[in-house]
Image (cartoon, rainbow, N blue to C red):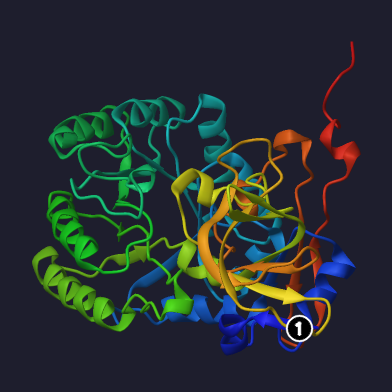
Amino acid sequence: MGKILSDVTDRMNFFEGIDPVGLAEKYGTPLYVYNERILRTRCRDLKQFVTYPEFEVDYSSKANCNLAFLQIVKSEGLKVDAVSMGEIYAQRLAGFEPEDIFFICNNVSEEEMRYAIDEGVLISVDSLAQLELFGRLNPGGRAAIRVNPGIGAGHHEKVVTAGKKTKFGISTDQLDQVREVLEKYHLTLAGINQHIGSLYMKGDELLQSMDRLLEIVMEFPGLEFVDLGGGFGIPYHKEDGEERLDLETLGKAIDEKMKEFTKRYGREITLRIEPGRYISAESSVLLGRVHAVKYNSGHKYAGSDIGFSVLIRPAMYDSYHGVEIYRPGDEPSAGKEEVTIVGNICESGDILAKNRLLPEIRQGDVLGILDAGAYGQAMSSNYNNRLRPAEVLIRENGEVVLIRERDTLEDLVRHQILL
């Protein structure tokens, strides 16, 4: 096998000595490949993030909700947050107890909220209307609220989840009404959480929002916890030497703020974070095959089986993913050239990597799309009646195990009914 371009995975020892072309041939493409060692390392990074004694990491499984993935996260001592009853169901199957799950809901139905209540899961609501619904369904119950601290951050406007232009959170000018609903239904407020956005590479916005959040917490004595949210970014431009989020510096700043807050509040409460991407993204490389090479108006296109039904982030968010090239054989590429890598979906927006300078790509090459473990398979679909890909895990002992089967044609119509 010729590794035409593999600098990043070689440095990470991602494939643990296993031939990615061999994986593609055995399991087919597209194929999500996960590395257990890297996943466990990221879990441990965050467990050691701060020295504040009452600290808890909740993995946001919307980033990746594969059952085997959840089992590994649980074995590392993390808890989990959910955003749907489907995620709660999967988390319970993976072994999480109700007290390990934090349901951070957004505009859910009565049925979905009742499901979480019946499961014994702590619920955070992000509107007065949903707090009213919770009170009617569970008077005398225990809940949390999600507030909008007025500061947002993120790599794209579609993932900024706080500030002036967002659907999320209870505004700070509605806190008196929150108190009224709590009193009306005899509810206990267990905690207050926020989430300002996704994929920030500096901690400035988080620290600013934390100041505002802790001021809100000061207005509610008797809380069990405060939750800073997630959004911790990872370096998607690894091949260009992009620096990592400085967890050590950020953690020290948070420790200082919690130390000062504890003095003012009169006691320690639990500090929670809920990162998803930081834990899951770097643990996966998505393999795909180049099935066609063509030139339009002098520009080269490499047509692969990685359409946006498999990885939608580039099409939806203009997101960047690094690309590696593996070749079944040892013949090297002639040199570098500008190429646009596209998928097999019947849409002009089905572009995986635009105008990249890469070694010559040939028909039959296997592509490795880096950092695909967050919002990859989790956001995949059957659009164009394409089959969602399989997932395999490289265990710490080097064994490769299948953790999700590829869809079949029968799966596409399993729930449809002919006239």
Q: Residue at x 66, y 65 (%)?
A: 69
Q: Position of residue 87 (x, y in %)?
A: 60, 47
* Residue position marked by numbered label 1 in the rendering: 2
Judge left or right: residue 104 versus residue 306: left
Type of amino acid under label 1: Gly
Q: Is residue 351 above or below residue 17?
A: above
Q: Position of residue 73 (x, y in %)?
A: 59, 70
Judge left or right: residue 34 versus residue 266: right
Q: Is residue 407 above or below residue 44?
A: above
Snapshot quadrant of residue 75: bottom right
Judged from this view, the residue extending furthest toward the left is 264
Q: Position of residue 387 (x, y in %)?
A: 79, 45
Helix, strand or loop at label 1? It is: strand
Snapshot quadrant of residue 52: bottom left
Q: Residue at x 83, y 35 (%)?
A: 412
Tell which of 190 and 113 is nearer to you.
113
Question: Considering the image in quadrants, where does the N terminus appear?
Answer: bottom right
